[in-house]
């Protein structure tokens, strides 16, 4: 089971702030998780595969799209932030 968190514009778009999921066994890294979420279709497809730039964090540490995770991890998705 993974705990997913969605922030900022992404949270507004998908309509939830967090959810617990059990992805299939072949979903082992951030990139494959994003593809699996995009396969939900609709807004999920638009946000996770539609060209929107998203950052990820695993257990509150920034992670690249090839970063792997394990059962019980928290994965947060958020749009890039600019300073100012």
Image: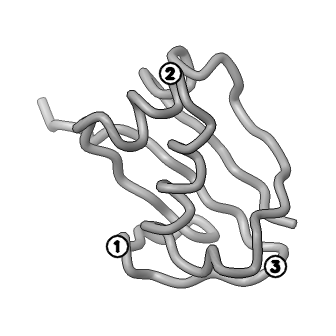
In this rendered view, identify the residue nearer to me: 3 or 29. Answer: 29
Position of 10 with respect to 40 (left or right) is left
In terms of secondary structure, where does tag 2 sit? helix
Q: Is disc 1 in contact with disc 3, using a CB cutoff of under 8 Å?
A: no
Relative image position of residue 25 (x, y in whole percent): 75, 80
User: Is 18 rendered above or below residue 20?
Assistant: above
The residue carrying pointer 1 sits among few (fewer than 14), some (14 to 19) or many (20 or more) residues within 10 Å by Cα, namely some
Q: Which mark is residue 71?
A: 3
Q: Which mark is residue 64?
A: 1
Mark 2 and mark 3: span between their CA atoms? 26 Å
Residue at (36, 53) in percent of width and height: 55
Of the residues under marks 2 and 3, which one precedes in the sequence?
A: 2
Mark 1 and mark 3: span between their CA atoms? 18 Å
Residue at (41, 68) in percent of width and height: 62
The residue carrying pointer 2 sits among few (fewer than 14), some (14 to 19) or many (20 or more) residues within 10 Å by Cα, namely some
Residue at (42, 41) in percent of width and height: 48
Of the residues under marks 1 and 3, which one precedes in the sequence?
A: 1
Of the residues under marks 2 and 1, which one precedes in the sequence?
A: 2
In terms of secondary structure, where does tag 1 sit? loop
User: Is 55 rendered above or below residue 41?
Assistant: below
Relative image position of residue 22 (x, y in whole percent): 84, 62
In terms of secondary structure, where does tag 3 sit? loop
- Observer-side mark, 2 or 1, equals 2
User: Is 14 rendered above or below residue 22?
Assistant: above
Residue at (12, 29) in percent of width and height: 84
Q: Can you identify the residue that label 2 sits on?
A: 43
Q: Which mark is residue 48?
A: none
- Observer-side mark, 2 or 3, equals 2
Relative image position of residue 64 (x, y in whole percent): 34, 73
The residue carrying pointer 3 sits among few (fewer than 14), some (14 to 19) or many (20 or more) residues within 10 Å by Cα, namely few
Quadrant for the N terminus in the image: bottom right
In this rendered view, identify the residue nearer to me: 70 or 84. Answer: 70
């Amino acid at each position: 089971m993974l705990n997913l968190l969605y922030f900022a514009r992404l949270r507004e778009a998908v309509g939830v702030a967090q959810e617990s999921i059990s992805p299939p066994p072949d979903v082992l890294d951030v990139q494959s998780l994003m593809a699996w979420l995009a396969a939900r279709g609709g807004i999920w497809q638009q946000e996770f595969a539609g060209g929107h730039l998203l950052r990820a964090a695993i257990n509150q540490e920034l992670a690249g799209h090839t970063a792997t995770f394990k059962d019980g991890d928290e994965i947060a998705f958020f749009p890039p932030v600019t300073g100012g």
